[in-house]
Image (tube, helix red, strand yellow):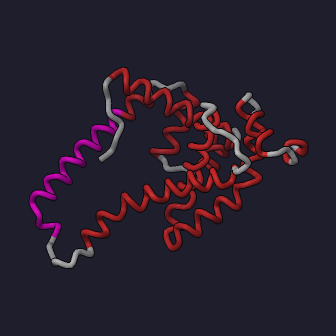
């Protein structure tokens, strides 16, 4: 591990894509503090609620990109990670802003008494409920290690560190299992004609 800690980012990326999981651990150790600090700074007062999730999802996306060999090393690994985190934070704000804008609308409209909005919301809730049921069915068809990590991450809302501690594997292994679980669930959803999108 000492040798890996002194290797360049490019060497570590190449080792990881060739199957050396310890190489990703070295990258994680090298950049986790700076990435987490960046995420907290960008989130501001929301950091307590969202920082851990954004941090973990950033590395999930990084792993998926690296494993699929879609990453082109240009000497800027940390900026690439922060760009992923930035996009996830932007997605978070986009999800929150519509409700914030509606709540602060200057026309004093009572959105809770808007029948059309309430009906649309109720319909969305039904669709989301069905989607979550579909996800649960797909999850039950996964191999046990993948099903376990999906259950703990999405239904018990554990962090990947907590999942790793509970299952006795590394964080990297937990992330890898999630990666393959998502691939398998997307493939099954396509085969069954199921949409996994929440609205």
Query: Is 193 left, or right, of 143 in this rendering?
Result: left
Query: Is 61 left, or right, of 91 in this rendering?
Result: right
Number of marks drawn: 0
Determine if the magenta segment contains residue 74: no
Picture quadrant where residue 110 is located = bottom left
Residue at (56, 43) in percent of width and height: 61
Picture quadrant where residue 198 is located = top left
Vertical position of residue 94 compared to residue 72: above or below:
below
Vertical position of residue 125 compared to residue 11: above or below:
below
Residue at (34, 40) in percent of width and height: 197
| Residue most extreme to the right | 3
Residue 103 seen from this side? yes
| Residue most extreme to the left | 115
Residue 174 seen from this side? no
- Judge by depth and name the residue closer to the eye, 198 or 34: 34
Coordinates of residue 175 in the picture (x, y in percent): 61, 40
| Residue most extreme to the top | 191
Coordinates of residue 152 in the picture (x, y in percent): 52, 43
Residue at (31, 69) in percent of width and height: 100
- Judge by depth and name the residue closer to the eye, 187 or 42: 42
Coordinates of residue 105 in the picture (x, y in percent): 23, 74
- Judge by depth and name the residue closer to the eye, 69 or 101: 69
User: Is the stretch drawn in magenta largely helix, strand or loop?
Assistant: helix
Determine if the magenta segment contains residue 127: yes
Picture quadrant where residue 68 is located = top right
| Residue most extreme to the front | 74
Residue at (53, 72) in percent of width and height: 44
Q: In the rendered view of the protein, which quadrant contains the N terminus?
A: top right
Coordinates of residue 148 in the picture (x, y in percent): 54, 35
In the rendered structure, which segment of residues is drawn in magenta?
111-134
């Amino acid at each position: 591990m000492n040798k890996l800690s002194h290797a360049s980012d490019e060497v570590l990326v190449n080792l990881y894509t060739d199957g050396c999981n310890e190489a990703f651990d070295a990258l994680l150790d090298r950049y986790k503090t700076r990435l987490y600090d960046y995420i907290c700074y960008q989130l501001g007062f929301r950091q307590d609620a969202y920082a851990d999730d954004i941090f973990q999802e950033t590395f999930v996306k990084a792993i998926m990109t690296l494993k699929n060999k879609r990453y082109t090393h240009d000497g800027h690994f940390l900026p690439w990670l922060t760009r992923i985190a930035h996009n996830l934070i932007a997605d978070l704000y986009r999800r929150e802003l519509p409700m914030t804008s509606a709540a602060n609308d200057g026309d004093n409209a009572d959105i809770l008494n808007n029948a059309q909005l309430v009906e649309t919301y109720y319909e969305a809730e039904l669709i989301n409920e069905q989607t979550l049921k579909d996800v649960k069915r797909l999850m039950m068809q996964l191999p046990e290690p993948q099903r376990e990590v999906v259950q703990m991450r999405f239904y018990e809302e554990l962090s990947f560190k907590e999942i790793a501690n509970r299952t006795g594997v590394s964080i990297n292994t937990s992330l890898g299992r999630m990666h393959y679980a998502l691939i398998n669930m997307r493939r099954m959803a396509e085969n069954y004609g199921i949409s996994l999108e929440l609205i």
